[in-house]
Amino acid sequence: MAAGKLWREASSYAELCELGARFLEGDLDTFPGWGADDTDEETDEISGLLAAWCRRGFLTVASQPGEPDGPGHDGRLERRRAFVTGFVDEHAAERLASLSGELLVILDRCPDEMPLGLRGEDVFLALGPDAPEAELALFEQALCAAACADLRRQRWACVVDPTWGRVESLWSSLAAVLARPYP
C-alpha cells in the first residue's frame, strides 16, 4: 500500500505515531508536509531515538542536532541549538516535563519566537507561537477527519537544549527518559 494512502487511512493518534516511526526508520517514503522521501542526513544518527519516541506518544515533526560554532555558507559564524518538536499525548508530555531542569521543555506553544539557528546576528531558524497550527494545517491535507480530530486533542511540545552548539546533551537526555542507549 502506498505510504500516502496509509496516512489517509489512519484514524487515530496512535496510528499516526506508528507511521511517523516507520518513516523515521526508512520503511515509508512519505510524511505529511515533508517534501522528501526520507529524512535529512543530519537525522540519521537520531532517527532510531525519534522513532522510539513516536512509539511512546511523541509524534516528532522537526528536529536538528546542535552544531558547534563554525563558518556558515556565507562565511559568517553559524550556530545551532539541538531541538525536537511535535505532538505529544499526556503520558509523553509527563515524560518530557521531567527533563525541564536540564533542557527547555515547552508544552502547548512558544510564548515568543525562539531562535534555533543563527548566522551572525541573523536568525535563520526559529520556533514561533504559530508552529502548532502550521503543522496541523500540513497534517490536515494528508489525513482523514478522524485522525485530524485525534491529533488536535494532543498537546504540542518542543524540547530545546538551551546551550548553543552542544551536540549530545538533548539526545542523551531523551534516551535516558526512555531507558534506551544513545546513539
Image (cartoon, rainbow, N blue to C red):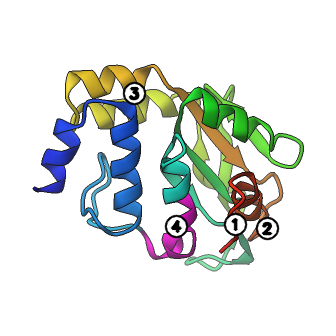
User: Where does label 1 land, which residue?
Assistant: 66
Please give the name of the residue rendered at 68% of the width and 45% of the height, measured from the top-left corner.
Answer: 159
Mark 1 residue crowding within 10 angstroms, few (<14) / some (14–19) / many (20+): many
Q: Amino acid at mark 3?
A: Leu
- Return the x and y of residue 179 as percentages of the image width and height: 72, 58
Q: Amino acid at mark 4?
A: Gly
> Is residue 172 placed above or below 158 in the rendered structure?
below
Query: What mark, if any, has residue 151 been given in the picture?
Result: 3
Disc 4 from disc 1: Cα separation: 17 Å
Q: Which of the marked residues, 1 or 2, is nearer the chain's N terminus?
A: 1
Relative placement, left or right, of 3 versus 158 is: left
Q: Which of the marked residues, 2 or 4, is nearer the chain's N terminus?
A: 4
Disc 3 from disc 1: Cα separation: 28 Å
Mark 4 residue crowding within 10 angstroms, few (<14) / some (14–19) / many (20+): some
Q: Are marks 3 and 4 in contact (CB under 8 Å)?
A: no
- Return the x and y of residue 23 as percentages of the image width and height: 34, 60
- Return the x and y of residue 78 as percentages of the image width and height: 68, 70
Please give the name of the residue rendered at 48% of the width and 58% of the height, measured from the top-left corner.
Answer: 51
- Magenta-colored stretch includes residue 163: no
Find the magenta span and give its range. Answer: 40-50
Residue toward you, 50 or 164: 50
- Magenta-colored stretch includes residue 43: yes
Q: Are marks 1 and 2 in contact (CB under 8 Å)?
A: yes
User: Where does label 4 land, which residue?
Assistant: 48
Query: What mark, if any, has residue 166 been given in the picture?
Result: 2
> Is residue 114 placed above or below 37 in the rendered structure?
above
